[in-house]
Image (cartoon, rainbow, N blue to C red):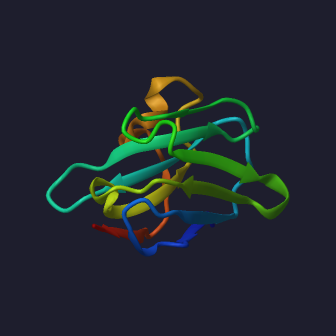
Amino acid sequence: QVQLVESGGGSVQAGGSLSLSCAVSGYTYNGYCMGWFRQAPGKEREGIAYIYSNGGRSDYADSVKGRFTISQDNAKNTVYLQMNDLKQEDTAMYYCAALGPYGGSWCFRPDRYKYWGQGTQVTVSS
């Protein structure tokens, strides 16, 4: 059984940093995308970062590029999202997802992923 458990969310002031973790179990990294998504109230879930699960390329949505960094530790079966210079518009529920597309911009699409975590809330205040 595949499980993804996010942690590390919380409240922070604008300009601050948070580091999210996604512990993965029951899943073998196989080169498919693993992604981070977020969903603000009243908005659609959006892809913000992905990484090829074999440790290859990663990419970011323009809204977070230069501020967020996705990484993974295969030994710990964990995917991370380091978020710096947070802005109020980053406030959302953040989700990690596994078994996405094999690559490319499809990895930003939430409908392309099979497994999801329960989410962790990030709130950025002014």
Camera-side residue: 110 or 94? 94
Left or right: 112, with 20 as reference point: left
Q: Residue furthest left?
A: 42
Q: Residue furthest right?
A: 75
Is residue 108 in view?
Answer: yes
Q: Is residue 56 above or below residue 1?
A: above
Q: For the C terminus, give its image quadrant.
A: bottom left
Residue situated in front as seen by the camera: 50 or 113: 50
Q: Position of residue 24 (x, y in %)?
A: 66, 63
Q: Against 17, is 50 above or below?
A: above
Is residue 3 visible to us here? no
Q: Residue furthest top?
A: 104
Q: Residue at x 49, y 65 (%)?
A: 117
Please name the residue shown 55% across and 40% down the image: 50
Q: Quick one: quadrant of the N terminus?
A: bottom right
Q: Position of residue 118 (x, y in %)?
A: 44, 70
Relative to residue 2, is residue 89 depicted above or below?
above
Residue at the extreme bottom of the image, as rendered: 10
User: Which quadrant of the structure image shows residue 80?
Assistant: bottom right
What residue is shown at x 61% (from left), y 65% (from top)?
A: 21
Q: Position of residue 78 (x, y in %)?
A: 70, 60
For image coordinates 51% across by 56% down, the residue present is 96
Q: Can you tell which quarter of the image residue 34 is in?
A: top right
**Numbered disc total:** 0
Q: Nearer the viewer, residue 2 or 9?
A: 9
Residue 92 position, x and y percent, is 31, 62
Looking at the image, residue 114 sits to the left or right of residue 62; the answer is: right
